[in-house]
Image (cartoon, rainbow, N blue to C red):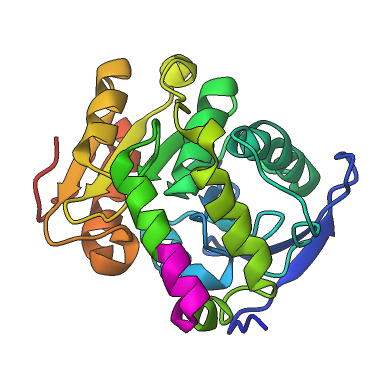
Amino acid sequence: MADSLFAMEFITLHALPESPRIEWRRLRTRRADDRTEAPCMVFLHEGLGSVAAWRDFPDQLCAACGLDGLVYSRPGYGQSTPRAPGEHWDARYLHRQALEVLPALLAALGIHQPWLFGHSDGATIALLHAAAFPEAVAGCVALAPHVFVEQKALQGIRRARQAYEAGPLRERLGRVQSNTDSAFYGWCDAWLDPGFRHWTIEDEIATLRCPLLVIQGEDDAYGTMEQVGRITRILPHARSLMLEKCGHIPQRDAPGDVIRAVLNCIHSQAGRTFATSRSQG
């Protein structure tokens, strides 16, 4: 059973046919009497993530930025509605999250023009959503995003499957997932499906217009800098940051660098910059 140190809330998305129950947590960093217009930072977790899996990083980032935040678990994850027995997520599962579930959640919670902060699968969802709704997103931060399938990613997922079925990974996921099989096999079986081999969203993200920061760890076991290269070729306005000695989870391996880079991206709109300690393009 997933454990959490944070108080969770739940909302049922009746606008969607399956009416999923979504676990979410709102972060309040702004004073109640602050009437200035400021976007909310919405956190989109990785393929094995959840609200609990973020730990306190969203709190740190929102406090540094002076923004409120929203953290939620997608259907199939955390304490949200689990994946139905026998349900197989196909190559469009990230699109459904970006184009159906996320819009329904934002509408239900009254969140407009957010900043999106996505990690791995969540970064892909953030890119798809920002491209599909270019006037509805204030900005986008994509950590370890996937815009096409790399053999390195498939190899990493096969290793994860071995670790899960051997036991250690299953035990670790049990701390952040109420139904570990729902989360793990939903993600793993989708990516390893032969129909996913030629998956790409490169054409679809070309309409993204908001400020964009892409962050990639040099030692990522699931992707390479070619993901960043393809994004920046399609979207020349994107900023990029490569982090040395950093794996697939930059917010864990280099939280200070990530926070400073996000601050740069947000405040550059007002002509302010914050120093980053590693190379930024």
Q: Is residue 105 left or right of residue 192?
A: right
Q: Nearer the viewer, residue 22 or 48?
A: 48
Write the residue at 68% across / 43% down.
111
The answer to whether residue 138 is visible is no
- In percent of width and height, residue 181 lies at 65, 68
Relative to 63, does residue 135 appear above or below in the rendering?
A: above
Name the image quarter holding residue 280: top left
Name the image quarter holding residue 202: top left
Q: Nearer the viewer, residue 211 or 127?
A: 127
Write the residue at 75% across / 49% down.
109
Magenta region: 160-169
The answer to whether residue 47 is visible is yes
Write the residue at 43% across / 37% down.
140
Q: Is residue 257 left or right of residue 109?
A: left
Relative to 237, does residue 259 appear above or below in the rendering?
A: below
Relative to 174, does residue 29 appear above or below in the rendering?
A: above
